[in-house]
Amino acid sequence: MTTRSASIVFGTQYYRPPFPDKRFWPEDPERIVSCGMNTVKLWAVWSWIERTEGSFYFEDLDELFEICANGGRGVVHNLISEGAPYWLERRLPEAAYTANDGYRAEFSGAANMPSGGWPGLCRDNFQVAAFANRFLEQVALRYRERLNLV
């Protein structure tokens, strides 16, 4: 019989773009470890990553993954397709969430989505779904080989 050692994932949310400021990145992970945590959650927000159509900005997440890997910390990736890019809202205005009375939900930078694009667009629209799925695929392909991905 083979035994496996189990570890418990214990951590904190760390990165919701654009916070925290990059100047804190080198020392914050050590503070997290000093609290007994072994994992951080990093948000991959669509509006932050695909700022222009087809161009994906991964520099922040790449750097944070490296910082965490160097310190032996795991990373939970929180994929946020609800924060849709503004270029897509302009391209597909008919895909906005719209109530029965005609009220249209406009994009904003809500407290839970400081990088904007909230509440996103209706994924019942096949074009929105295709763009969102492309975003999710790009993130998955980029980070699938990371050994510290939890």
Image (cartoon, grey):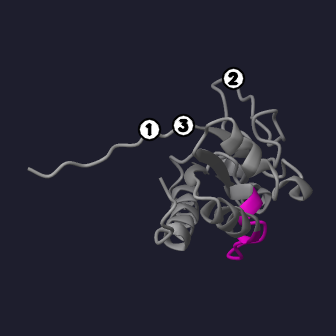
Q: Which residues are magenta?
A: 48-59
Seen at 75% across and 71% down, the residue is 59
Any magenta on residue 122? no
Mark found first going from the N terminus, 2 or 3: 3
Report the residue that reaches farthest toward the bottom.
55
Residue 140 on image: x %, y %: 50, 65
- Measure how far apart labels 2 and 1 are at the Cα level: 48 Å
Residue 40 on image: x %, y %: 63, 46
**Residue at disc 2, secondary structure:** loop
| Amino acid type of the residue tagged 3 in the rendering | Phe
The reply to whether dot 3 and dot 1 touch (C-beta < 8 Å) is: yes
The residue where tag 1 is placed is 8
The numbered mark at residue 10 is: 3
In the image, residue 77 above or below residue 10 = below
| Amino acid type of the residue tagged 2 in the rendering | Asp
Residue 95 on image: x %, y %: 64, 48
Considering depth in this image, is 52 or 38 the residue closer to the camera?
Answer: 38
- Measure how far apart labels 3 and 1 are at the Cα level: 6 Å
Q: Residues within 10 Å of mark 2 (few under 14, many from 20)?
A: few
The reply to whether dot 2 and dot 3 touch (C-beta < 8 Å) is: no
**Is 104 displayed left or right of 129 in the figure?**
right
The residue where tag 2 is placed is 101
| Amino acid type of the residue tagged 1 in the rendering | Ile
**Residue at disc 3, secondary structure:** loop
- Measure how far apart labels 2 and 3 are at the Cα level: 45 Å
Q: Residues within 10 Å of mark 1 (few under 14, many from 20)?
A: few
Any magenta on residue 53? yes
Residue 131 on image: x %, y %: 58, 63
